Amino acid sequence: MKRLSVFAFAVAGISLLALGTGVLAADSNIGTWKLNLAKSKYSPGPAPKSQTLKIEALGANGVKYTSDGADADGKPTHTAFQAQYDGKPSAFTGMADADMISYKRIDANTVESTTTLKGKPAVVSKAVVSADGKTRTLTQIGVNAKGEKVNNVLVYEKQ
């Protein structure tokens, strides 16, 4: 009886360990991503001159996001947030069009987010990482701080 209990526990433990490892490793958004301007579309413009995202795992169910680059005039840009994949708002710094963001993981390759500015909805985004893990496409729809309609498609390549 003891051997069966220990064996059953060991099998359950291996299954949980494998499941836990798979869940943590499954977030394909984690990594460093460089914006491919030639494949991206900004409406309204102008597009930035460059942008690199660094997305790091934050615990078992969240991300630490930093973005550095240069705006259309060549001035340095920096945005950052930390969020859980629970849909609850988190502070978003460095962004003229948003001060809060909520994040939800749809599956290992898809994340949806909603930004707000001063309590009002701004932009809804959907990030999809390709099956080969080399491309991250971010589609953004909403309204910017100037009241202009936003319809962007940003294509990033894994570094």
Image (cartoon, rainbow, N blue to C red):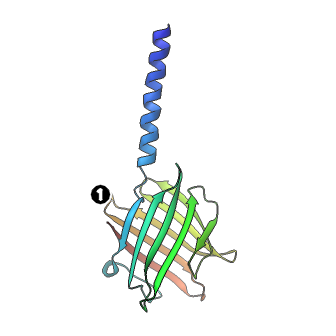
Residue of label 1: 132
| Of 55 and 140, the residue lying toward us | 55
User: Mark 1 packing: few (<14 Cα in 10 Å), some, or many (20+)?
Assistant: few
Residue most extreme to the top: 1
Residue ID at (51%, 82%)? 150
Q: Position of residue 58 (x, y in %)?
A: 52, 55
* Residue 39, above or below 109: below
Residue ID at (48%, 69%)? 66
Residue most extreme to the bottom: 73
| Of 91 and 119, the residue lying toward us | 91
Q: Is residue 150 left or right of residue 91?
A: left
Residue most extreme to the right: 119
Residue 147 location, quadrant: bottom right
Residue 51 location, quadrant: bottom left
What kind of element bears circle 1? loop
Q: Position of residue 24 (x, y in %)?
A: 45, 47
Q: How many marks?
A: 1
Residue ID at (49%, 74%)? 140
Q: Position of residue 64 (x, y in %)?
A: 51, 62
| Quarter of the rendering occupied by the C terminus | bottom left
* Residue 109, above or below 51: above
Please, what is the three-letter code of the amino acid marked with disc 1?
A: Asp
Q: Is residue 118 left or right of residue 30?
A: right
| Of 86 and 143, the residue lying toward us | 86
